[in-house]
Image (cartoon, rainbow, N blue to C red):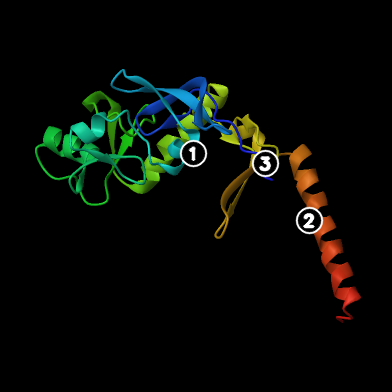
Amino acid sequence: MAVRKPIIPGTRFGRLVVQGAAPPLKSSPSRTRLQVYVLCDCGTSKMVLPENLKSGNTNSCGCLAKAGRTISPQGYLREGRKLEHIEVVERALGKRLPKGAQVHHWNENRTDNRNSNLVICPNRAYHILLHYRTKAYDACGHADWVKCTFCKRYDDPKNLHKNEQIRSGVRYWHVPLCAAAIAMQARQRKKKTSRKLDAIGFQ
């Protein structure tokens, strides 16, 4: 039987942020179901079932439905067919968003569509860069540092070896420690493949 992972307080689901465990829900005399307290961006607190949060069935306290809005599968607010953050940006610009441009949410909350929280990115690559820099700053306090592909630690790019590959993209690792470990792994994989070929009689 698979063990369900508990939802960590502070995790966001749509407009709801998990606050902690709540009293269990007794659905029948012999069955109880776990619940959690959540706080909606509108300020309303309520108890919900974790499975409803994970499935996306519950993403607000009900305030979105009252306002005639929904949340898209990607987590963005939508009123009708158009995404709300796109409408906010185009209203501020006074024209349509340029072709290829994307909108970034500065605080990573996709339902926070205040003007001060939206950044217009000229293309998708710049949008991804902002997310990478935000993750780096949150992890180590340096937005320009990158993560070692092998040991997963952030460090100054000057201390890392950079390898650009067409299929796997740009990868970084520490030299010489992680480089030696990566070379050892490659040798072990090569030996393992060689043994398998020998076992089936491949010459």
Label 2 or label 3, whichever comes before in sequence order: 3
Q: CA distance from mark 2 to mark 1?
A: 41 Å
Residue 29, located in which quarter of the rendered image?
top right
Label count reads 3
Amino acid marked by disc 3: Trp
Q: Under tag 1, what secondary structure?
A: helix
Q: Residue at x 33, y 31 (%)?
A: 60
Q: Pointer 2: what residue? A: 186
Quadrant in the picture for the N terminus = top right
- Please report the residue visible at 90 percent of the width from the left and 75 percent of the height from the top: 198
Q: What is the distance, in whole Å, between disc 2 and disc 3 at their CAs?
A: 15 Å
Of label 3 and label 1, which has the lower sequence position? Answer: 1
| Residue at the image point whose x is 54% and y is 59% from the top | 166
Residue 147, given in percent of the width and then of the height, sits at 60, 36
Reading the image, the residue beneath label 1 is: 51
Confirm whether residue 89 shows in the render: yes
Within-10-Å neighbours for mark 3: few <14, some 14–19, many 20+:
many
For the question of whether residue 176 can be seen, the reply is no
Residue 84 position in % (x across, y down): 21, 38
Front residue of this view, candidates 107 and 158: 107
Q: Position of residue 156 (x, y in %)?
A: 60, 30
Alpha carbon of mark 3 to alpha carbon of mark 1: how far?
A: 38 Å
Element type where label 3 sits in the image: strand
| Residue type for callout 2 | Ala
Q: Is residue 140 above or below residue 50?
A: above
Q: Nearer the viewer, mark 3 or mark 1?
A: 1
